Image (cartoon, helix red, strand yellow):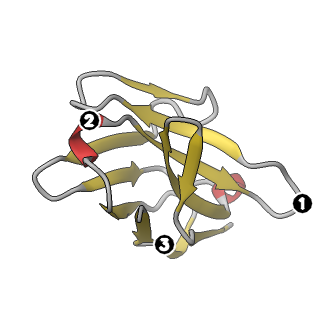
């Protein structure tokens, strides 16, 4: 069974930083791309960052480019999201995602709250 467990969220002031982690199990982590999404209150879930299976390729939403960095450690079955220069509009629940075939798996989410 696929399991994704996010951690690292919290309450941070504008301009601060957080590093989110997603611990994965139940599948061959190193062979799958990973993604981070976020869902702000009352809004749709939004793709924030993508990383290829090896980590060689990354993409970001325009709203977070130059502030967010996705990375992975395949030896630890973990994907990270480094968030710098936090803004209040970054406040959301952040989710780790993997698509295996036609099945999307999600973690429980970790909350990020940015105070102004």
- CA gap, disc 1 to disc 2? 34 Å
Locate residue 61 relative to residue 76 in the image: left or right.
right
- CA gap, disc 2 to disc 3? 26 Å
**What label does residue 42 carry, if any?**
1
Neighbours of disc 2 within 10 Å: few (<14), some (14-19), many (20+):
few
**What label does residue 111 carry, if any?**
none
Q: Position of residue 46 (x, y in %)?
A: 69, 43
Image quarter where the N terminus lies is bottom left
Q: Position of residue 79 (x, y in %)?
A: 31, 52
Considering the numbered disc 1 on the image, is that residue within a helix, a strand or a loop?
A: loop
In terms of sequence position, does the residue under pointer 2 or pointer 3 come before the other?
3
Q: Residue furthest right?
A: 42
Neighbours of disc 1 within 10 Å: few (<14), some (14-19), many (20+):
few
**What label does residue 31 carry, if any?**
2
Relative height, residue 44 to residue 22 (above, below): above
> Looking at the image, which residue is at 82% across and 48% down?
44
Q: Nearer the viewer, residue 13 or 63?
A: 63
Q: Residue furthest top?
A: 57
Q: Quadrant of residue 42?
A: bottom right
- CA gap, disc 1 to disc 3? 19 Å
Considering the numbered disc 2 on the image, is that residue within a helix, a strand or a loop?
A: helix
Locate residue 32 relative to residue 63 in the image: left or right.
left
> Looking at the image, which residue is at 46% across and 40% down?
67
In terms of sequence position, does the residue under pointer 1 or pointer 2 come before the other?
2
Q: Position of residue 59 (x, y in %)?
A: 46, 25
Residue at which label 3 appears: 9
Task: Assess whether mark 3 and mark 1 are in contact (beta carbons under 8 angstroms).
Answer: no
In terms of sequence position, does the residue under pointer 1 or pointer 3 come before the other?
3
């Amino acid at each position: 069974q696929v399991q994704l467990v996010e951690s690292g969220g919290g309450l941070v002031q504008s301009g601060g930083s957080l590093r989110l982690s997603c611990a994965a199990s139940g599948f061959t982590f190193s062979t799958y791309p990973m993604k981070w999404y976020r869902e702000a209150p009352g809004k749709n879930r939004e793709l924030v960052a993508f990383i290829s299976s090896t980590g060689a390729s990354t993409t970001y939403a325009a709203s977070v480019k130059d502030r967010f960095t996705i990375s992975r450690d395949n030896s630890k079955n973990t994907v990270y999201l480094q968030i710098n220069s936090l803004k209040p509009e970054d406040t959301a629940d952040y989710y780790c995602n993997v698509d295996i075939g036609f099945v999307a798996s999600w973690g429980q989410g970790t909350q990020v709250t940015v105070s102004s």
